[in-house]
Image: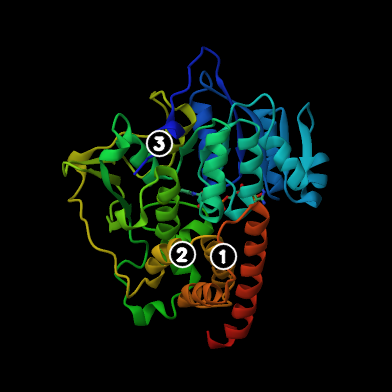
Amino acid sequence: MTSTPELFLPRPTCNQPKSIVILGSTGSIGRQALEVAKARPDLLRVVGLAAHSNTELFAAQIAEWRPQVAALWDEDAAQRLRSMVSGSTKILGGSGGVEEVATWPQSTLVLGAMLGAAGLGPTMAAIRAGKDIAIANKETLVAAGQIVTVEAREHGVALLPVDSEHSAIAQCLRGEESRSVTRLTITASGGPFVDTPRSELETVSPERALKHPTWAMGRKITIDSASLMNKVLESIEAYWLFDVPMEQIDVLVHRQSIVHSLVTFCDNSVKAQLGVPDMRLPIQWALLHPERVSGSPPPLDLFSMGPLSFEKPDAERFPSLNFGREVMQMGGTAPCAMNAANEVAVEAFLARRTGFYGITNCIAAVLERHENVKRPALDDIADADAQARRIADEWITRNSSVI
Ligand code: NDP
Ligand code: MG
């Protein structure tokens, strides 16, 4: 096992605040990143923002942060935005505009907090421009982990995990030899359906699935947490970030979301990272790496807490759990197809066009028909993504009557 400590190389610190760009600033992670930046203006300066189409909130963010550059992916929304803002911020639109923000010369670090595989283009552009990446957008690593990590190494940029589990693992690996790591254990709250019987899950509503017990997050990742697909995406994310074989990556249900993940070493010693379930903590860790400073996240008070529990996840009720090893064994564009199918199926579930198990059934149907490209280039990833979305759409349309 040759882990990738160079991805976490400490950068030289200087007295200037770090200039950062936030892709997905109107989302759950993006808004919390701005809170982190607000708490430490001495250390962080926001020079660029990007989002999709939420013009009202984005205009308010521009008014408050006065970034040098800002872009909305949606061209019409960008056009509307131009009439809503004043000041010197350069306003851009479309995928090209978001890429210009991602590669903005005055920034040194880009927070990738966009939703879904759409984050791949801007992330690749940022890497090629030599920016360090704080990566929340796990779908990018699932869709094209090999390409992203190879290019990050070639351009000497750091890939700093924001996902709480990967932040925990990175913190546990600090100061350790990668060859002494024998297992990564990713914790899972279990989501809102941790105790729900299979028969009830067949007909469960999107509203119930959106009620996460421990984390407040965007809608897509909340559904991924309910189906446990989030843990599949996270296992693949861990594979690419830490170069540990899939057979040595486990998922452990830990309902309280206090232990964020664990690393086992060859002497059977186990290290874990703990903290309150508050994404500002891993966001701050990634943005300010390698420094630890006081900021917004509250302290953990173990004295006032009940017992911490650990359980095996139930692959019978959550069949998604089998996809991780399956698609990584298939390799090539299979993880990209799985991710795209999941994005389509989650949208369909939220729109009541398919049931809860429609999500995993749709992914299985897409993987069955997927024409795998073993050593994909970026174009092959784009093709696989588009093909998988087409097949998933067809599957949803054909099966929507069964809800
Ligand atoms: P949200 O749905 O809350 O926010 C998504 C953000 O991405 C919004 O700012 C949205 O803009 C923007 N966006 C969507 N599509 C595009 C696009 N094509 N171009 C530019 N911006 C775009 O999601 P989250 O913040 O919950 O999640 C973001 C990422 O972080 C996901 O990959 C998720 O898996 C990951 N993550 C999230 C965690 C969490 O606690 N929320 C924890 C760990 C990882 P707009 O508002 O204009 O639509
Ligand atoms: Mg996570």
Q: Earlier in the sequence, mark 2 or mark 3?
A: 3
Point 43% across, 63% down: residue: 329
65 and 343: which one is in front? 343
95 and 65: which one is in front? 95
Instruction: Give the side of residue 357 with respect to residue 343, left or right.
Output: left
Instruction: Give the side of residue 129 with respect to residue 203, left or right.
Output: right
Mark 3 is on which residue type?
Leu
Disc 1/disc 2 C-alpha distance (Å): 9 Å
Name the spot of residue 41 as percent of width and height, x first. 53, 22
Mark 1, other Cα within 10 Å: few <14 / some 14–19 / many ≥20: many
Q: Earlier in the sequence, mark 1 or mark 3?
A: 3
Mark 2 is on which residue type?
Val
Disc 2 versus disc 3: nearer the observer: 2
Point 56% across, 45% down: residue: 148
Dot 1 corresponds to which residue? 337
On whether ligand 1 comes within 8 Å of the CB at mark 1, the answer is: no
Name the spot of residue 54 as percent of width and height, x first. 68, 49
Tell me if label 1 and label 2 are in contact, CB under 8 Å. Answer: yes
Q: How many marks?
A: 3
Point 58% across, 55% down: residue: 116
Point 59% across, 47% down: residue: 114
Dot 3 corresponds to which residue? 281
Circle on res. 274? none
Name the spot of residue 106 as percent of width and height, x first. 67, 24
Q: Is residue 398 above or below residue 224?
A: below
Mark 1 is on which residue type?
Ala
Dot 2 corresponds to which residue? 327
